[in-house]
């Protein structure tokens, strides 16, 4: 006479009635009343009993890797897992974050193409790592390597664009200070006022726009000149000018008018015989008088 048997709800193995654990998977017999076992179809998400090998809704074949224990305690975790593994949702989330960040970047005082691309690069650097890890967890090392190549190519391309746009950033700054803007916002100063602003604004309070005139008495390459604002000879009322424009070639003793931005102060001991700290101006408009 055959002994009665019990079927394991996890692997459907038939066990003798006196067996406390399943001989195939080790499932504890007494846990049958506490758990209800299902596998979820990956195609249509239908819940199917472990006793069937094809989805009752769409016919998808059962796979052990997709068997899931469902109870009231893990429903929330299951939904969260589906959400974070939904690539389409994450891509949409990334695009939304990029849009908001780019809008903030463009709206800022220093908004530029370089700043926007840098923002996109930093955001995608984070999401790119997510895509790689997700690919590795779902498809293994081979597919993860393909994802690394794709994401790496995108990031390298962005870095190249950042480098190219950074080269033209100086021109962007010059364009932002049009001559009309400078004329409307720059204050006309003598040397004493300029010297006071340079020392007062040295640090975080720089960038005061100013207008002044003087005579070129020293050229330090094509981008740097020393201007003498002295009304009398040998008074050493010197201004160090860093040129951001090249509209006019200048020579020694040329009288010039300059619109620029106060950067701070610097020593000109290498140009003069004595130690002297003078105002430093970034010139955005230089004209001959």
Image (cartoon, rainbow, N blue to C red):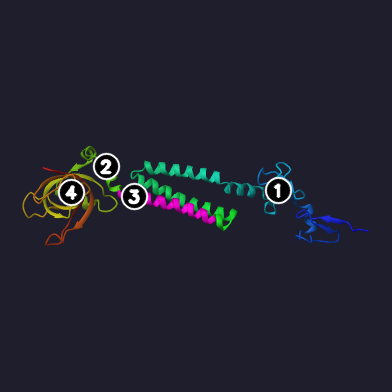
The tag earlier along the polypeptide, 4 or 1, is 1
Residue 276 in magenta? Answer: no
Q: Where's residue 46, x and y in %? A: 70, 43
Q: Nearer the viewer, residue 240 or 23?
A: 23
Residue matched to label 3: 164
Query: Marks 3/1: CA distance?
Result: 53 Å
The tag earlier along the polypeptide, 3 or 1, is 1
The tag earlier along the polypeptide, 4 or 2, is 2
Q: Where's residue 155, x and y in %? A: 43, 52
Query: Marks 3/2: CA distance?
Result: 18 Å
Residue 151 in magenta? Answer: yes
Residue at 76%, 55% in the rendered image: 11
Tell me: 220 left or right of 113.
left
User: Mark 2: few, some, or many residues within 10 Å (few <14, many ≥20)?
Assistant: few
The tag earlier along the polypeptide, 4 or 3, is 3
Q: Quadrant of residue 267?
A: bottom left
Q: Secondary structure at mark 3?
A: helix
Residue 239 visible to the viewer: no
**Closer mark to the observer between disc 4 and disc 3:** 3
Pointer 3 and pointer 1: residues touching (CB < 8 Å)? no
User: Mark 3: few, some, or many residues within 10 Å (few <14, many ≥20)?
Assistant: few
Q: Is residue 236 above or below residue 246?
A: below
Residue matched to label 1: 61
Query: Marks 4/1: CA distance?
Result: 82 Å
| Residue range of the region highlighted in magenta in the rendering | 144-167
Q: Main secondary structure of the magenta part?
A: helix
């Amino acid at each position: 006479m055959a002994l009665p048997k019990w079927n394991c709800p996890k692997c459907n193995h038939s066990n003798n009635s006196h067996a406390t654990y399943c001989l195939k998977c080790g499932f504890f017999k007494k846990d049958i009343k506490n758990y209800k076992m299902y596998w979820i179809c990956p195609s249509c998400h239908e819940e199917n009993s472990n006793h069937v090998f094809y989805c009752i809704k769409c016919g998808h074949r059962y796979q052990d890797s997709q068997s899931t224990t469902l109870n009231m305690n893990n429903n929330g975790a299951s939904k969260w897992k589906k959400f974070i593994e939904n690539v389409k949702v994450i891509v949409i989330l990334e695009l939304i974050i990029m849009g908001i960040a780019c809008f903030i970047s463009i709206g800022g005082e220093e908004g530029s193409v370089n700043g926007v691309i840098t923002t996109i690069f930093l955001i995608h650097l984070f999401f790119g790592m997510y895509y790689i890890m997700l690919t590795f967890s779902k498809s293994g090392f081979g597919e993860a390597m393909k994802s690394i190549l794709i994401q790496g190519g995108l990031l390298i391309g962005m870095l190249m664009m950042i480098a190219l746009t950074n080269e033209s950033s100086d021109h962007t700054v010059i364009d932002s200070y049009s001559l009309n803007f400078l004329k409307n916002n720059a204050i006309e100063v003598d040397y004493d006022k300029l010297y006071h602003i340079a020392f007062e604004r040295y640090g975080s309070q720089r960038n005061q726009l100013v207008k002044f005139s003087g005579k070129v008495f020293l050229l330090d390459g094509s981008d740097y000149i020393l201007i003498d604002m002295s009304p009398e000879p040998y008074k050493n009322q010197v201004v160090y000018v860093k040129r951001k424009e090249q509209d006019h070639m200048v020579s020694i003793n040329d009288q010039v008018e300059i619109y620029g931005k106060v950067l701070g102060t610097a020593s000109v001991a290498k140009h003069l015989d004595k130690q002297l700290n003078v105002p430093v101006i970034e010139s955005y408009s230089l004209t001959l008088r």
